[in-house]
Image (spheres, helix red, strand yellow):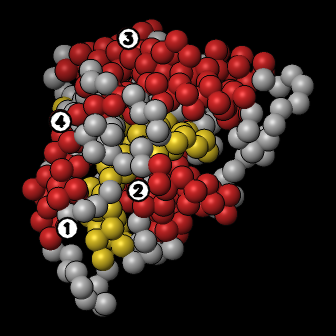
Protein backbone atom coordinates (compact mmCIF):
# COMPACT_ATOMS: atom_id res chain seq x y z
CA UNK A 1 0.00 0.00 0.00
CA UNK A 2 2.44 2.61 -1.31
CA UNK A 3 1.10 6.17 -1.39
CA UNK A 4 4.24 8.04 -0.36
CA UNK A 5 5.20 9.40 -3.78
CA UNK A 6 5.10 8.55 -7.45
CA UNK A 7 8.89 8.81 -7.18
CA UNK A 8 8.75 5.60 -5.13
CA UNK A 9 7.32 3.56 -8.02
CA UNK A 10 9.67 1.52 -10.18
CA UNK A 11 10.35 1.95 -13.88
CA UNK A 12 7.66 0.94 -16.35
CA UNK A 13 8.72 -2.32 -18.08
CA UNK A 14 8.64 -0.89 -21.62
CA UNK A 15 10.98 1.91 -20.56
CA UNK A 16 13.34 -0.43 -18.74
CA UNK A 17 13.41 -2.70 -21.80
CA UNK A 18 14.32 0.27 -23.98
CA UNK A 19 17.27 1.14 -21.75
CA UNK A 20 18.55 -2.42 -22.00
CA UNK A 21 18.04 -2.50 -25.77
CA UNK A 22 19.98 0.73 -26.33
CA UNK A 23 22.95 -0.71 -24.45
CA UNK A 24 24.07 -2.90 -27.36
CA UNK A 25 27.10 -1.54 -29.21
CA UNK A 26 28.47 2.00 -29.37
CA UNK A 27 26.44 5.18 -29.88
CA UNK A 28 27.33 8.85 -30.42
CA UNK A 29 27.61 10.74 -27.14
CA UNK A 30 26.30 14.01 -25.70
CA UNK A 31 22.87 13.86 -27.33
CA UNK A 32 24.00 13.08 -30.85
CA UNK A 33 22.53 9.58 -30.75
CA UNK A 34 19.85 8.68 -33.32
CA UNK A 35 17.32 7.93 -30.58
CA UNK A 36 17.46 11.58 -29.54
CA UNK A 37 16.54 12.56 -33.08
CA UNK A 38 13.33 10.53 -32.71
CA UNK A 39 12.62 12.06 -29.32
CA UNK A 40 12.98 15.56 -30.69
CA UNK A 41 10.62 14.89 -33.59
CA UNK A 42 8.11 13.09 -31.33
CA UNK A 43 7.90 16.00 -28.93
CA UNK A 44 7.56 18.48 -31.77
CA UNK A 45 4.69 16.43 -33.19
CA UNK A 46 2.97 15.94 -29.82
CA UNK A 47 3.09 19.66 -29.08
CA UNK A 48 2.36 20.78 -32.66
CA UNK A 49 5.53 22.85 -32.43
CA UNK A 50 7.90 22.10 -35.35
CA UNK A 51 10.34 24.83 -34.29
CA UNK A 52 10.62 23.75 -30.65
CA UNK A 53 14.01 22.71 -29.31
CA UNK A 54 14.29 19.79 -26.90
CA UNK A 55 16.95 19.01 -24.29
CA UNK A 56 17.08 16.09 -21.85
CA UNK A 57 18.35 16.15 -18.28
CA UNK A 58 18.15 13.55 -15.52
CA UNK A 59 16.28 15.47 -12.80
CA UNK A 60 13.34 17.80 -12.43
CA UNK A 61 15.41 20.21 -10.38
CA UNK A 62 17.89 20.56 -13.24
CA UNK A 63 15.08 21.02 -15.75
CA UNK A 64 13.39 23.75 -13.73
CA UNK A 65 16.51 25.58 -12.62
CA UNK A 66 18.17 25.62 -16.04
CA UNK A 67 14.93 26.64 -17.76
CA UNK A 68 14.37 29.52 -15.35
CA UNK A 69 18.00 30.63 -15.59
CA UNK A 70 17.77 30.75 -19.38
CA UNK A 71 14.85 33.18 -19.27
CA UNK A 72 15.55 35.34 -16.23
CA UNK A 73 18.59 37.56 -15.57
CA UNK A 74 20.34 37.52 -12.17
CA UNK A 75 18.69 40.81 -11.23
CA UNK A 76 15.21 39.59 -12.19
CA UNK A 77 12.21 38.47 -10.15
CA UNK A 78 10.65 35.04 -10.71
CA UNK A 79 6.94 35.21 -9.84
CA UNK A 80 5.70 31.92 -8.36
CA UNK A 81 2.88 30.71 -6.16
CA UNK A 82 3.90 30.69 -2.51
CA UNK A 83 3.77 26.87 -2.51
CA UNK A 84 5.23 26.35 -6.00
CA UNK A 85 7.78 23.58 -6.37
CA UNK A 86 10.43 26.13 -7.38
CA UNK A 87 9.92 27.83 -4.02
CA UNK A 88 9.47 24.97 -1.55
CA UNK A 89 11.29 21.97 -3.03
CA UNK A 90 14.33 23.06 -5.05
CA UNK A 91 16.80 24.01 -2.27
CA UNK A 92 17.45 27.37 -3.95
CA UNK A 93 18.46 25.79 -7.28
CA UNK A 94 16.63 28.37 -9.47
CA UNK A 95 18.36 31.18 -7.60
CA UNK A 96 21.71 29.39 -7.82
CA UNK A 97 21.60 28.56 -11.53
CA UNK A 98 20.26 32.00 -12.48
CA UNK A 99 23.05 33.67 -10.55
CA UNK A 100 20.79 35.30 -8.00
CA UNK A 101 17.28 35.84 -9.40
CA UNK A 102 14.79 36.50 -6.60
CA UNK A 103 11.59 34.46 -6.27
CA UNK A 104 8.62 36.71 -5.54
CA UNK A 105 5.69 34.84 -4.03
CA UNK A 106 2.08 35.10 -5.16
CA UNK A 107 -0.70 33.85 -2.84
CA UNK A 108 -3.67 31.81 -3.98
CA UNK A 109 -6.02 29.11 -2.74
CA UNK A 110 -5.61 25.41 -3.53
CA UNK A 111 -2.01 25.88 -4.68
CA UNK A 112 -2.91 28.12 -7.62
CA UNK A 113 -2.20 31.79 -8.23
CA UNK A 114 -4.88 33.94 -9.84
CA UNK A 115 -4.37 36.39 -12.71
CA UNK A 116 -5.40 39.23 -10.42
CA UNK A 117 -2.98 38.18 -7.69
CA UNK A 118 -0.15 37.84 -10.17
CA UNK A 119 -0.87 41.23 -11.73
CA UNK A 120 -0.78 42.92 -8.33
CA UNK A 121 2.51 41.25 -7.44
CA UNK A 122 4.19 42.20 -10.71
CA UNK A 123 2.89 45.77 -10.55
CA UNK A 124 4.29 46.12 -7.03
CA UNK A 125 7.81 45.43 -8.32
CA UNK A 126 9.20 48.87 -9.03
CA UNK A 127 11.03 49.47 -12.30
CA UNK A 128 13.69 51.90 -13.38
CA UNK A 129 15.28 51.96 -9.93
CA UNK A 130 18.76 50.49 -9.71
CA UNK A 131 18.07 49.57 -6.07
CA UNK A 132 15.15 47.27 -6.94
CA UNK A 133 15.00 43.78 -8.40
CA UNK A 134 13.55 43.98 -11.92
CA UNK A 135 10.61 42.04 -13.36
CA UNK A 136 11.89 38.77 -14.79
CA UNK A 137 9.49 35.90 -15.52
CA UNK A 138 6.58 33.78 -14.26
CA UNK A 139 6.73 30.09 -13.30
CA UNK A 140 3.74 27.75 -12.80
CA UNK A 141 3.66 24.26 -11.29
CA UNK A 142 1.14 21.92 -12.93
CA UNK A 143 0.09 19.61 -11.17
CA UNK A 144 0.41 22.02 -8.20
CA UNK A 145 1.91 21.13 -4.84
CA UNK A 146 -1.66 21.00 -3.48
CA UNK A 147 -2.67 18.39 -6.04
CA UNK A 148 -4.83 20.79 -8.05
CA UNK A 149 -4.54 21.35 -11.80
CA UNK A 150 -4.39 24.58 -13.78
CA UNK A 151 -6.75 24.11 -16.72
CA UNK A 152 -5.59 25.21 -20.17
CA UNK A 153 -7.82 28.25 -19.75
CA UNK A 154 -6.29 29.10 -16.39
CA UNK A 155 -2.78 28.76 -17.83
CA UNK A 156 -3.77 31.10 -20.66
CA UNK A 157 -5.16 33.67 -18.20
CA UNK A 158 -1.93 33.63 -16.18
CA UNK A 159 0.15 33.87 -19.35
CA UNK A 160 -1.87 36.86 -20.56
CA UNK A 161 -0.98 38.78 -17.42
CA UNK A 162 2.68 37.87 -17.88
CA UNK A 163 2.65 38.93 -21.53
CA UNK A 164 0.92 42.21 -20.67
CA UNK A 165 4.00 42.96 -18.57
CA UNK A 166 6.35 41.61 -21.25
CA UNK A 167 7.43 38.58 -19.20
CA UNK A 168 8.15 34.99 -20.34
CA UNK A 169 6.45 32.00 -18.68
CA UNK A 170 7.91 28.69 -17.50
CA UNK A 171 5.71 25.68 -16.78
CA UNK A 172 7.04 23.14 -14.29
CA UNK A 173 5.44 19.98 -15.66
CA UNK A 174 7.02 17.28 -13.51
CA UNK A 175 3.49 15.79 -13.55
CA UNK A 176 2.48 17.38 -16.84
CA UNK A 177 0.96 14.12 -18.12
CA UNK A 178 -1.27 13.85 -15.04
CA UNK A 179 -2.41 17.45 -15.48
CA UNK A 180 -3.07 16.94 -19.17
CA UNK A 181 -5.27 13.86 -18.84
CA UNK A 182 -7.14 15.52 -15.97
CA UNK A 183 -7.92 18.62 -18.05
CA UNK A 184 -8.57 16.74 -21.32
CA UNK A 185 -6.87 19.44 -23.38
CA UNK A 186 -4.08 19.05 -25.93
CA UNK A 187 -0.39 19.46 -25.09
CA UNK A 188 -0.28 22.54 -27.32
CA UNK A 189 -3.33 24.10 -25.65
CA UNK A 190 -1.81 23.56 -22.22
CA UNK A 191 1.52 25.14 -23.19
CA UNK A 192 2.60 27.37 -26.09
CA UNK A 193 -0.90 28.10 -27.37
CA UNK A 194 -1.67 29.41 -23.89
CA UNK A 195 1.51 31.50 -23.84
CA UNK A 196 4.11 29.22 -22.21
CA UNK A 197 7.66 29.85 -23.45
CA UNK A 198 9.48 26.92 -21.85
CA UNK A 199 8.24 23.62 -20.39
CA UNK A 200 9.81 21.16 -17.98
CA UNK A 201 8.24 17.96 -19.33
CA UNK A 202 8.42 15.30 -16.64
CA UNK A 203 9.08 11.60 -17.06
CA UNK A 204 10.61 10.42 -13.79
CA UNK A 205 7.42 10.63 -11.71
CA UNK A 206 5.42 8.85 -14.40
CA UNK A 207 7.30 5.61 -15.02
CA UNK A 208 10.72 6.66 -16.30
CA UNK A 209 13.96 5.71 -14.57
CA UNK A 210 15.22 9.27 -14.52
CA UNK A 211 14.69 11.71 -17.40
CA UNK A 212 13.04 15.09 -17.95
CA UNK A 213 12.74 17.10 -21.14
CA UNK A 214 13.08 20.86 -21.39
CA UNK A 215 11.01 22.06 -24.33
CA UNK A 216 11.90 25.51 -25.60
CA UNK A 217 8.96 26.93 -27.54
CA UNK A 218 11.11 30.04 -27.95
CA UNK A 219 14.06 28.63 -29.94
CA UNK A 220 16.05 31.87 -29.58
CA UNK A 221 17.19 30.56 -26.17
CA UNK A 222 18.58 27.32 -27.61
CA UNK A 223 22.28 28.13 -27.53
CA UNK A 224 22.10 29.71 -24.09
CA UNK A 225 20.32 26.66 -22.68
CA UNK A 226 22.87 24.31 -24.27
CA UNK A 227 25.69 26.24 -22.65
CA UNK A 228 23.97 26.39 -19.27
CA UNK A 229 23.27 22.66 -19.32
CA UNK A 230 26.93 21.89 -20.01
CA UNK A 231 28.29 24.46 -17.56
CA UNK A 232 25.87 23.25 -14.89
CA UNK A 233 27.09 19.65 -15.20
CA UNK A 234 23.87 18.24 -16.64
CA UNK A 235 24.97 17.22 -20.15
CA UNK A 236 25.18 13.42 -20.03
CA UNK A 237 28.02 11.90 -22.04
CA UNK A 238 26.20 8.54 -22.41
CA UNK A 239 23.09 10.43 -23.39
CA UNK A 240 21.46 7.48 -25.16
CA UNK A 241 20.24 6.16 -21.80
CA UNK A 242 18.21 9.34 -21.35
CA UNK A 243 17.06 9.29 -24.97
CA UNK A 244 15.92 5.67 -24.79
CA UNK A 245 13.77 6.36 -21.75
CA UNK A 246 12.03 9.34 -23.30
CA UNK A 247 11.62 7.57 -26.63
CA UNK A 248 9.83 4.61 -25.01
CA UNK A 249 7.84 6.95 -22.78
CA UNK A 250 6.39 8.73 -25.81
CA UNK A 251 5.97 5.67 -28.03
CA UNK A 252 2.34 4.84 -28.64
CA UNK A 253 1.11 7.32 -26.03
CA UNK A 254 2.56 5.34 -23.11
CA UNK A 255 3.10 8.55 -21.15
CA UNK A 256 -0.63 9.30 -21.27
CA UNK A 257 -1.66 5.74 -20.43
CA UNK A 258 0.60 5.70 -17.35
CA UNK A 259 -0.74 9.05 -16.14
CA UNK A 260 -4.33 8.05 -16.80
CA UNK A 261 -3.89 4.95 -14.66
CA UNK A 262 -2.37 6.97 -11.81
CA UNK A 263 -5.26 9.44 -11.95
CA UNK A 264 -7.83 6.63 -12.11
CA UNK A 265 -6.36 5.02 -9.01
CA UNK A 266 -6.50 8.40 -7.26
CA UNK A 267 -10.17 8.72 -8.20
CA UNK A 268 -10.84 5.25 -6.80
CA UNK A 269 -9.06 6.21 -3.59
CA UNK A 270 -10.94 9.51 -3.36
CA UNK A 271 -14.32 7.82 -3.76
CA UNK A 272 -13.53 5.43 -0.92
CA UNK A 273 -12.19 8.17 1.34
CA UNK A 274 -15.23 10.36 0.81
CA UNK A 275 -17.41 7.52 2.06
CA UNK A 276 -15.61 7.62 5.43
CA UNK A 277 -17.17 10.17 7.82
CA UNK A 278 -13.92 10.80 9.70
CA UNK A 279 -11.98 11.80 6.57
CA UNK A 280 -11.93 15.40 5.28
CA UNK A 281 -10.25 16.79 2.17
CA UNK A 282 -7.92 19.78 2.46
CA UNK A 283 -7.85 20.57 -1.26
CA UNK A 284 -9.68 19.44 -4.40
CA UNK A 285 -8.25 16.30 -6.03
CA UNK A 286 -7.68 16.92 -9.72
CA UNK A 287 -4.97 14.42 -10.64
CA UNK A 288 -2.97 11.82 -8.69
CA UNK A 289 -2.32 13.67 -5.41
CA UNK A 290 -4.74 14.26 -2.55
CA UNK A 291 -4.46 15.76 0.90
CA UNK A 292 -6.79 14.58 3.66
CA UNK A 293 -7.10 14.87 7.40
CA UNK A 294 -8.20 12.04 9.67
CA UNK A 295 -7.76 11.03 13.33
CA UNK A 296 -4.33 9.89 14.42
CA UNK A 297 -5.70 6.44 15.32
CA UNK A 298 -6.70 5.82 11.69
CA UNK A 299 -3.20 6.75 10.52
CA UNK A 300 -1.74 4.40 13.15
CA UNK A 301 -4.03 1.58 12.06
CA UNK A 302 -3.18 1.97 8.37
CA UNK A 303 0.56 2.26 8.94
CA UNK A 304 0.59 -0.74 11.26
CA UNK A 305 -1.00 -2.72 8.42
CA UNK A 306 1.81 -1.68 6.07
CA UNK A 307 0.51 1.47 4.39
CA UNK A 308 3.21 3.99 3.50
CA UNK A 309 2.53 7.70 3.02
CA UNK A 310 3.62 11.00 4.51
CA UNK A 311 2.12 13.02 7.32
CA UNK A 312 2.28 16.75 6.66
CA UNK A 313 4.38 18.59 7.38
CA UNK A 314 7.08 15.97 6.97
CA UNK A 315 8.29 14.72 10.31
CA UNK A 316 4.92 14.93 12.09
CA UNK A 317 5.08 12.27 14.87
CA UNK A 318 2.58 9.43 14.74
CA UNK A 319 2.48 9.23 18.52
CA UNK A 320 -0.02 11.40 20.38
CA UNK A 321 -3.72 11.83 21.09
CA UNK A 322 -5.65 9.18 19.11
CA UNK A 323 -8.42 11.58 18.06
CA UNK A 324 -6.13 14.45 17.00
CA UNK A 325 -6.56 15.08 13.28
CA UNK A 326 -3.42 14.91 11.15
CA UNK A 327 -2.96 16.01 7.55
CA UNK A 328 -1.45 13.55 5.09
CA UNK A 329 -0.55 13.42 1.41
CA UNK A 330 -1.57 10.38 -0.65
CA UNK A 331 -0.02 9.91 -4.09
CA UNK A 332 -0.88 7.23 -6.63
CA UNK A 333 1.34 6.22 -9.54
CA UNK A 334 1.41 4.23 -12.76
CA UNK A 335 2.19 1.17 -10.60
CA UNK A 336 -0.60 1.57 -8.03
CA UNK A 337 -3.06 -1.32 -8.08
CA UNK A 338 -6.75 -1.44 -7.26
CA UNK A 339 -5.89 -4.03 -4.61
CA UNK A 340 -3.59 -1.55 -2.86
CA UNK A 341 -6.29 1.10 -2.86
CA UNK A 342 -9.00 -1.24 -1.64
CA UNK A 343 -6.72 -2.73 1.01
CA UNK A 344 -5.89 0.74 2.34
CA UNK A 345 -9.55 1.70 2.51
CA UNK A 346 -10.34 -1.58 4.29
CA UNK A 347 -7.70 -0.73 6.92
CA UNK A 348 -9.29 2.64 7.55
CA UNK A 349 -12.73 1.08 7.85
CA UNK A 350 -11.33 -1.35 10.40
Pointer 2 or 4: first along the chain: 2
Residue that lies at the very extreme toward the right in this rendered image: 25
> Which numbered tag is attached to residue 122?
1
Pointer 2 or 1: first along the chain: 2
Residue at image mark 4 = 153
Image quarter for residue 180? top left
Residue 340, percent from left and from top:
45, 14
For residue 109, above or below residue 303: below
Mark 1 residue element: helix
Relative depth, front residue between 309 and 201: 201
Relative depth, front residue between 155 and 269: 155
Image quarter for residue 31? top right
Residue at image mark 2 = 86
Mark 3 or 1: in front is: 1
Pointer 1 or 4: first along the chain: 1
Marks 3/1: CA distance? 46 Å
Pointer 3 or 2: first along the chain: 2
Relative depth, front residue between 332 and 139: 139
Around disc 3, counting alpha carbons within 10 Å, would you say few (fewer than 14), some (14 to 19), or many (20 or more)? some
Mark 3 residue element: helix
Asked if residue 33 lies left or right of residue 109, the reply is right
Mark 2 residue element: helix
Around disc 1, counting alpha carbons within 10 Å, would you say few (fewer than 14), some (14 to 19), or many (20 or more)? many
Q: Is residue 133 visible?
A: yes
Residue at image mark 3 = 342
Amino acid sequence: MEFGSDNNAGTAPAILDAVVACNAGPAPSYGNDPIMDRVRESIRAIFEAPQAEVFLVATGTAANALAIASFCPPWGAVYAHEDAHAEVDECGAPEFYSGGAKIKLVPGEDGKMTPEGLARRIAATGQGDVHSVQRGMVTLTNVTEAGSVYSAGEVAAICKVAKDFGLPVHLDGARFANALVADVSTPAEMTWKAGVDVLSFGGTKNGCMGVEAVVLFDPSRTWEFALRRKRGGHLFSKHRYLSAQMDAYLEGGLWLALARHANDMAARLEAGLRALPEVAFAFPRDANIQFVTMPRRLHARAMKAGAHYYLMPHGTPLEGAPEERLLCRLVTSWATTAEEVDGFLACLRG
